[in-house]
Amino acid sequence: MKRLTPALILLLLLLNLNACSPFIVVGGVAGLGASVAVDRRSPDKIVEDEAIEIQATDFIYRNEDFGKKVHITVTSYNGTTLVAGEAPNESSKKFILDYVNRLKNVTQVVDAVEIKTAVPFSERSNDTWLTTKVKSKLMANKGLVTHTKVVTSEGNVYLMGIVNNNEAEEILKIVNDVSGINKVTALFEPYKDTQLDESITATARSGKREEKKQQAATELEEEDIIDVQPYTLPAPIQLSDDE
């Protein structure tokens, strides 16, 4: 059985990362990724996630035993890897999940595979439409789409991304109002705004310094222990001709 070579994987990564269209549909399950420019993952993590998806998909659909009987999509975000779709039996499902779990840089595998016949194309088109609706809603609300990856499988929506608590609550509120969704599952990772934290800390420290200065000045005035006199430069020395 043939495998993708490292060179081909790298080429596919570059093509995928630089694709003009933001829509990515693998195996009929709709996934729409966040823009690389505003992605909160490191560049290395983005490439690692892409490699996980390519290797897993290649393995699944090139397998002679079940490659034509399954409908599986693999989506990785910061090492968290969602495996969704349909498999004909439990043994095929376990074989796929075990393989994905062993891939390099996979930190955890989320099982969203159902034991059933692969869904028809009409249902897959509906998943694509639901993903588009969710993304449109998030785009219209403070640009939350930039930090969220949406995957839809059989009407079930999975949300992936690195977000803070306020963003997570807002995203879930918006998505839950989208009609046609069976279930929403959040696979978010917590985001800490380092720059904001540093700004707040610096402001607090600056405020404390000013407070201490004012306190010290007040104490000096009250105790009157220092008589401050203005400091002036001495007049320049003039030498006579005799000297």
Image: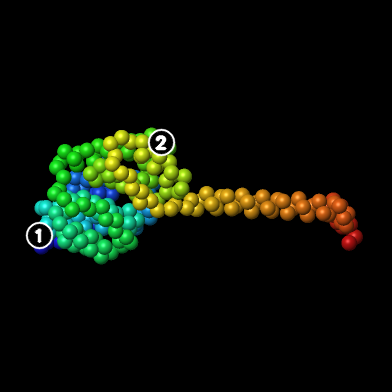
In the rendered image, the vertical position of residue 125 relative to residue 50, given as above or below: above
Q: Residue at x 16, y 61 (%)?
A: 91
Q: Secondary structure at mark 1?
A: loop
- Give the quarter of the image for residue 31: top left
Instruction: Judge left or right: residue 135 versus residue 239.
Output: left
How many numbered discs?
A: 2
Residue 207 x/y as whole percent: 67, 50
Mark 1 = which residue? 65
| Labels 1 & 2 near each other (Cβ < 8 A) | no
The front one of 110 and 12 is 110
- Give the quarter of the image for residue 98: bottom left
Q: Which mark identifies residue 168?
A: none
Mark 2 = which residue? 141
Instruction: Judge left or right: residue 150 versus residue 222.
Output: left
Q: Residue at x 13, y 49 (%)?
A: 117
Residue 225 x/y as whole percent: 88, 57
Q: Amino acid at mark 1?
A: Asp
Q: Residue at x 33, y 61 (%)?
A: 107
